[in-house]
């Protein structure tokens, strides 16, 4: 698995230190909030969310949303489908929406809008990675751990064809893996 990685972009220790900083900010910003609902987008946000929230000593609840915006491969489909039969009840809640990466922005834009439609009082967004590129959908990110170049990355929750999510770092795949 590690042999498929061309280069490590963000090492495990670097991620850990940055998460300490983001977690402190979230703790401070939501300190007075007594109805914090975290919503994580499956499956990419799982690893990031687990490591981040264990650093945030606040009372909160966690829900996960299954959306499809990437259908294998490395290209975004442009459409965001909500796959859960029942969506979490966020009515009147302050929501911290967590995703792995801000790429085209379509996923976060569509999910934030949906949560607002469902009556969320406030929606704040948090991503591990922000790609340096023009967005197809306008979206504001409140917490972003790292900015990266516009290249396809895997690890720390991010996959290629369902694999590499359990790598403890963010890395770039060997091009031969993508083309094979
Ligand atoms: P956007 O912002 O385009 O992001 O709606 C949709 C989803 O696409 C996935 N994504 C990636 N997954 N490496 C990945 O493994 C990448 O470089 C990458 N860029 C986007 C990700 O699941 C995101 O939530």
Image (tube, rainbow, N blue to C red):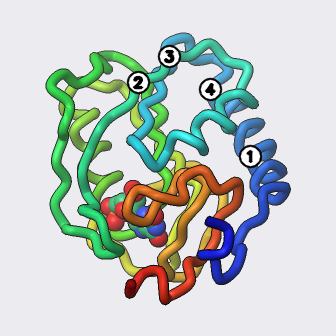
The secondary structure type at the circle numbered 1 is helix
Q: Which residue is depicted at the point 78% across and 56% down?
A: 12
Q: Nearer the viewer, residue 36 or 29?
A: 36
Is the N terminus in the top left, top right, bottom left or bottom right quadrant? bottom right
* SS at badge 2: strand
Residue annotated with mark 1: 19
Work out how far the residue at label 1 is from the one at label 4, CA to CA, in angstroms. 16 Å
Q: Is residue 99 left or right of residue 5?
A: left
Where residue 177 sits: x, y (%)?
Answer: 47, 81
The residue tagged 2 is: 63
Q: Kindly indicate whether the residue at mark 3 contacts the one at mark 2 (C-beta within 8 angstroms).
A: yes
Spatial CA span between label 1 and label 3: 19 Å
User: Can you identify the residue that label 3 sits on?
Assistant: 61
Lower position in the chain sequence, tag 1 or tag 3: 1
Residue 178 picture quarter: bottom left
| Earlier sequence position, callout 2 versus callout 4 | 4
Q: CA distance from mark 4 to mark 3?
A: 13 Å
Neighbours of disc 1 within 10 Å: few (<14), some (14-19), many (20+): many
Measured as percent of width and height from the top left, residue 180 is found at 39, 84
Q: Foreground mark, 1 or 4?
A: 1
Where is residue 132 drawn, in percent x and y?
Answer: 51, 78
The Cα atoms of the two marked residues, 2 and 4, are separated by 17 Å
């Amino acid at each position: 698995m590690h042999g498929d990685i061309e280069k490590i972009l963000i090492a495990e220790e670097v991620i850990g230190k940055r998460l300490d900083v983001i977690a402190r900010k979230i703790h401070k910003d939501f300190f007075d909030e007594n109805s914090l609902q975290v919503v994580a987008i499956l499956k990419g946000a799982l690893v990031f969310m687990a490591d981040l929230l264990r650093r945030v000593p606040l009372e909160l609840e966690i829900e996960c949303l299954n959306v499809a915006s990437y259908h294998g491969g490395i290209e975004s489909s442009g459409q965001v489908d909500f796959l859960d039969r029942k969506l979490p009840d966020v009515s009147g809640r302050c929501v911290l929406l967590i995703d792995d990466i801000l790429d085209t922005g379509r996923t976060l834009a569509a999910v934030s809008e949906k949560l607002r439609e469902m009556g969320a009082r406030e929606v704040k967004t948090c991503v591990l990675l922000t790609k340096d590129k023009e967005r197809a959908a306008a979206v504001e990110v409140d917490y972003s751990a790292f900015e990266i170049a516009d290249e396809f990355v895997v690890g720390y929750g991010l996959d290629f064809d369902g694999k590499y999510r359990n790598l403890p770092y963010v890395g770039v795949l060997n091009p031969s893996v993508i083309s094979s």
